[in-house]
Amino acid sequence: MLSTADPAAKVALSRAAAAGWRAGDLAEIGDAVPPDRPARPERPPLLPPREMPKRRAGGEREKRVALLHALAHIELNAIDLAWDLVARFASEAPPLTFFDDWVNVAGEEALHHSLLAARLAELGAGYGDLPAHDGLWEAAAATAHDLLARLAVVPLVLEARGLDVTPDMIRRLDLGGDDESAAILRVIYRDEIGHVAAGRRWFEWACARQGRPPIETYHHLVRRHFRGVLKPPFNREARAEAGFAAAFYEPLADRPETPA
Ligand SMILES: [Fe+2]
Ligand SMILES: [Fe+2]
């Protein structure tokens, strides 16, 4: 999966593997060594985040395509991040339910990417048409040495941030009359609450195994491995649904939250 560059092939392999795992056909856990970087298609070109072109004030359709393209890119990275977690940290011998959770996440990320790619095609565009940034894989590389750091930064900072910003995107798409795109984002939003919940569950599991206090450990790891601060407003409701308490993220906010 990680060494497959073509997005459609990666999606198909990921969904088949997730279905196979669920059916019990893949109960063998190997000890594959994941590549430092997953394979990527030639397009889109990957730029450092600060070199990304500013979104020009295009028409409705251009803006929509830019948004869906950015999300499709995040979801493609998310597929690799889930498989990387499965492959990289299998050596820590977590219980089987760890694999159940992350294989399921990989399958859902593959679905998300394919829904967005299909929607882009309906709008006369395609994944690869615009440049994309490489920030997500930088986060993966920075935490490749440590399961706790990986879980703190990827599901519990980046995916949790997705919960904060998605409702507003859905609202805008609804307002613009793009029901199809809004419906896809609703699917993603539901699933992502589950991904944050899995991150929180396994973070607490790994903390317990090492006898470390979860909240303090989270603060320490995010300050150390995540460049940047957490931006309020937080979607407390969705985060709470994922079992992710405010005591984790609130003290890391760049400014106190102003009541809405
Ligand atoms: Fe996703
Ligand atoms: Fe996710």
Image: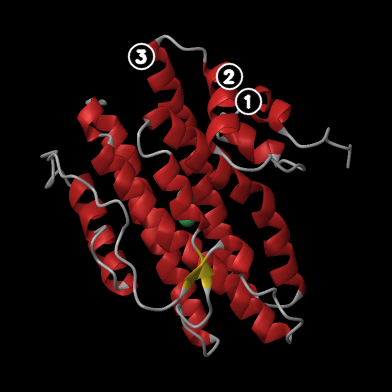
What is the spatial separation of the Cα atoms under label 2 and label 1, in whole angstroms? 5 Å
Eyeballing the image, is 2 above or below 161?
A: below
Q: Residue at x 60, y 24 (%)?
A: 219
> Which numbered tag is attached to residue 18?
none
Mark 2 lies on a secondary structure that is helix
Q: Quadrant of the N terminus?
A: bottom left
Which amino acid, mark 3?
Arg
Q: Amino acid at mark 1?
A: Phe
Q: Position of residue 102 (x, y in %)?
A: 34, 42
Task: Indicate the secondary structure of the residue bearing disc 1.
Answer: helix
Numbered disc 3: secondary structure: helix
Q: Residues within 10 Å of mark 3 (few under 14, many from 20)?
A: few
The residue under label 2 is which amino acid type?
Answer: Ile
Residue of label 1: 248
Which residue in the protein does label 2 denote? 215
Please say if the residues under marks 2 and 1 sit with CB atoms less than 8 Å apart.
yes
Q: Is residue 196 visible?
A: no
Tell me what residue is drawn at x 29 percent, y 31 percent. Answer: 97
Q: Residue furthest right?
A: 259
Q: Nearer the viewer, residue 225 or 6?
A: 225
Determine which residue is flagged by label 3: 209
Left or right for 116, reference 49: left
Quarter holding residue 182: bottom right
Distance between the Cα atoms at labels 2 and 3? Answer: 15 Å
Q: Residue furthest top?
A: 211
Residue 245 makes an appearance in the image: yes
Image coordinates for residue 248, horizontal then vertical, percent: 63, 25
Relative to 148, is 144 above or below? below
Q: CA distance from mark 3 to mark 1?
A: 19 Å
